[in-house]
Amino acid sequence: MNLERFMNGLEKKHPGELEYLQAVREVLESIEDVVNENPHFETSGIIDRIVEPDRILTFKVPWVDDNGKVHVNLGYRVQFNNAIGPYKGGLRFHPSVNLSILKFLGFEQIFKNSLTSLPMGGGKGGSDFDPKGKSDNEIMRFCQAFMMELWRLIGPETDVPAGDIGVGGKEIGFLFGMYKKLAQEHTGVLTGKGLNWGGSLIRPEATGFGAVYFAKEMLKTKGETFEGKTVAISGFGNVAWGATQKVTELGGKVVTLSGPDGYIYDPEGVSGEKIKYMLELRASNQDIVKPYSYEFPEAKFFQGKHPWEVKCDVALPCATQNELNKEDAETLVKNGCICVAEGANMPSTPEAVEVFLENKILFGPGKAVNAGGVATSGLEMSQNSMKLGWPAKEVDERLHHIMITIHESCVKHGKDADGYVNYVKGANIAGFLKVANAMIDLGVL
């Protein structure tokens, strides 16, 4: 495989899809040697097949606001690869949603799901609908209209969406209610469901918990723990909320949270009632973090800035893609940060990742670090299939075991000759091999 020739061809085929092309390049750079050492991958056309989605559904979503005005948004579902199981991946409702972003997320999801060792393929979907500032009735009408188009393509053994940015328990409830009405069946077709109607304990916290479990394993390779560590976190949604809980439980101190408006710095640490307040911030549906500084005056708010300028031992970017750039990475390294674990999907730019790897600090990519969310979605699917509900302790223990296993796979395939673990390389190779070999076994489809 000639990487540059392949990428040039892909860029001509999909011009302007920057996020998608970035994600593909990052994976292919890691697996290039593996592909070249195994000619059967090229003979079977694995790379050409794996970078293209199986199908993409695009549809309009007309809905009526509380004043009777009609709005039209775009809806998408990208079913990327189902070699090892039904398509699995979240729905994102955010104004930034476009095909490039969903293809990047769906492509990442293939390898992330593969790493969990659970039988799940990769997919992603969503809409440019903005739930911020909308009433519950407006969100309900939008979700129902969205599901009117989506329901024919999904099912518990076909495609199992979940939540993502802008899609929490409330939205999943509205979506599942309409699916149930249209399909006339109560099945595990969506994950992230409410506990009263098929959901799993620990699911809202799972991505954040899993990110911290993975970072804990990374620190362990250096004889370190979270005890006494200062931790910078971006975001304030479910991922940041779960991560803050688990870091605090393990003896660390979270000193930052962030939103689109800027970040807060709390030198006393985000713990106790402050963690509970994060849920109020999200429930306000305003997507801003500044009110934290009103509620807790000891915290300072920094308008329009990123939290990575704060001195910390561990950084957990848990907000969105490309939020941490080269300058941020250089600042973190300069300030003595020893570990960066991506709680979000591809939050570090390629230039930032290069800085981390060049300086040989512990760096965990999102497809490995934030796999805890989809892993617990897989556990929810298992519970739904068996018509059972596991206690929180059992779900948490299973999640912890999965994250330890993912870390072991990354170390196995990512350890360099000098002993440094390149987790990016390890995660990509481990995730790729399982899917690629399954595609070969299944024939050309």
Image (cartoon, rainbow, N blue to C red):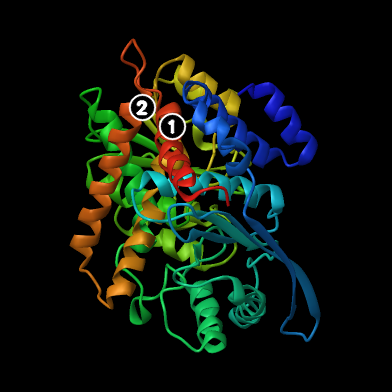
Residue occupied by mark 2: 413
Residue in the foreground of this view, choosing between 7 and 308: 7
Q: Is residue 22 visible?
A: yes
Q: Is residue 139 above or below residue 347?
A: below
Q: Are marks 1 and 2 in contact (CB under 8 Å)?
A: yes
**The residue under label 2 is which amino acid type?**
His
- In the image, residue 303 lies at what x, y percent? 61, 43
At numbered mark 1, what does the secondary structure look like: helix, strand or loop? helix
Res. 325 visible in picture: no
Percent position of residue 81, x then y: 54, 52
Rendered residue at 61%/49% (across/down): 260
Q: Quadrant of residue 276?
A: bottom left
Image position, residue 262 (x, y; %): 58, 44
* Amino acid at circle 1: Ile
Q: Residue at x 69, y 47 (%)?
A: 100
- Residue in the foreground of this view, choosing between 426 and 215: 426
Question: Which residue position holds label 1?
Answer: 429
User: Left or right of 195: which side holds 182?
Assistant: right
The numbered mark, 1 or 2, whose residue comes first in the sequence reads 2
Q: Nearer the viewer, residue 356 or 117?
A: 117
- Quadrant of the drawing holding the N terminus: top right
